[in-house]
Amino acid sequence: MPVVTGVLPGREAGEVWLTSHLCHPRPGANDNASGAAALLGVAAALAERRGRDLDRSVRFVWGPEFLGVAALLHERFERFGRDGRPIAVINLDMVGEDPVQCGVPLVVERAPDWCPSIITPLAEHVVEEVFAQTSAHAGTWRAGPFYGFSDHALFANFTDPSSRSPAVQLWHPGDPFNHSAADSLDKVSAVELLRAITAGAVLAHVLASDGATPLLSVVQRWCDREGRAAAAVAQRFDADHGAWSRRLVDHVREQGTVLRALVDAGPAACPPHRPGRGTFVGRWAGPFNYRGLLAQLSVDDRDEVVALFLADKRNYAVLTHLAMLADGCGSRDEAFDAASLALRFPIDAAAARPLWSALLASGWLEEAG
């Protein structure tokens, strides 16, 4: 399957990427014909403004999921080095779900904790406004932590921080028709698809333009709301995980401090990397790829990890978080805690231990010294 790209050129260096995968092994009107169509809609909207106020280029990417983006990144890194990476990424995957039939909200999946960016509060601000403007129609939205089940994960999951790009995703997790022959055109909502197109176009335009977007007010409002959300989560888990709940509130407050410090650097800025203490070192090449990791394990270890994925898909997100957050942690339990704070729920240590063991057994994570 080819990788298809199109570019709306800007006046300055740097590119904002919008990605959407073409492939699917089953009929998939929402997964992911809706995303592929939404990219066309975003391109049409931005093309009308071409040459007037687009400071950075916007690249649209269609291809097989994971493999297509990985191939394109490899080619760009070979040709341009780290300058070939995008400054920010918006991934559209399963964006057209009819909210009445599918019964799931649109989710803004945030940039991960190890790659914090103002793109997160910006995306949530834009999506909130889009839903406010279409409130006469059915449908809701919510924010969610980074899980990394689609192409946006490839931009954040490098061991080298200078190779990463901040990325967000718009999607509808929990669609009951997903991966079945019932994922047909009658499950697509024209209004929901228009919401995704509008949000993607506005967010891409802000990221690609040197405009007067009031970033500080957007970020401060996000910090206030996130602080309230963290307090609610902490209260829910306080009875059984009191110490963790207090750490969560502190962690969210620290994340807000990081984002406020980025305001003057522009909407696609990331904080400078602070070297870890060197207790653990990631050894995989390119973006983190769990299939590659599984190939390095014994049959028994591989079967155990796959069983955990099948029992709860979130365990894949736990594995990714452990791999990425181990740098800077002084122990396995500290890495468990960092992953749970980023995911916003106490992770199951019984499930996390085999995942951690798999990272070490594969050689993709090493303990220094």
Image (tube, grey):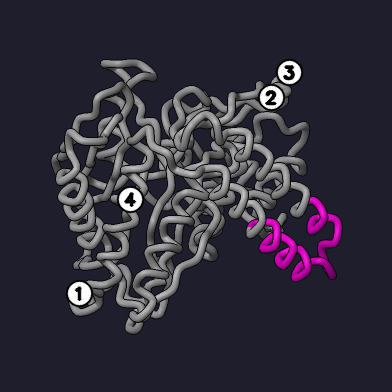
Q: Amino acid at mark 3?
A: Gly
Query: Sequence order check: which comes first, mark 3 or mark 2?
Result: 2
Answer whether labels 3 and 1 touch (C-beta < 8 Å).
no
Q: Residue furthest bottom?
A: 100
Q: Earlier in the sequence, mark 2 or mark 4?
A: 4
- Is 48 a magenta residue? no
Q: Which region shows up in magenta?
A: 226-247
Q: Are marks 2 and 4 in contact (CB under 8 Å)?
A: no
Instruction: Name the residue nearer the viewer: 91 or 218.
Output: 218
Q: Which mark is drawn over residue 184?
A: 1
Q: Residues within 10 Å of mark 3 (few under 14, many from 20)?
A: few
Residue at the image position 50 percent from the left and 48 percent from the top: 120
Q: Main secondary structure of the magenta part?
A: helix
Tell me the distance, in whole angstroms, between the alpha carbons under discs 4 and 1. 28 Å
Specify the quadrant of the image occupied by residue 33.
bottom left
Mark 4 — residue? 202
> Badges 1 and 2: C-beta atoms under 8 Å apart?
no
The image shows residue 173 at horizontal and vertical percentages of 42, 66
Tag 2 secondary structure = loop
Which residue position holds label 3? 369
Judged left or right of residue 83, residue 224 is right
The residue tagged 2 is 276
Q: Nearer the viewer, mark 4 or mark 3?
A: 4
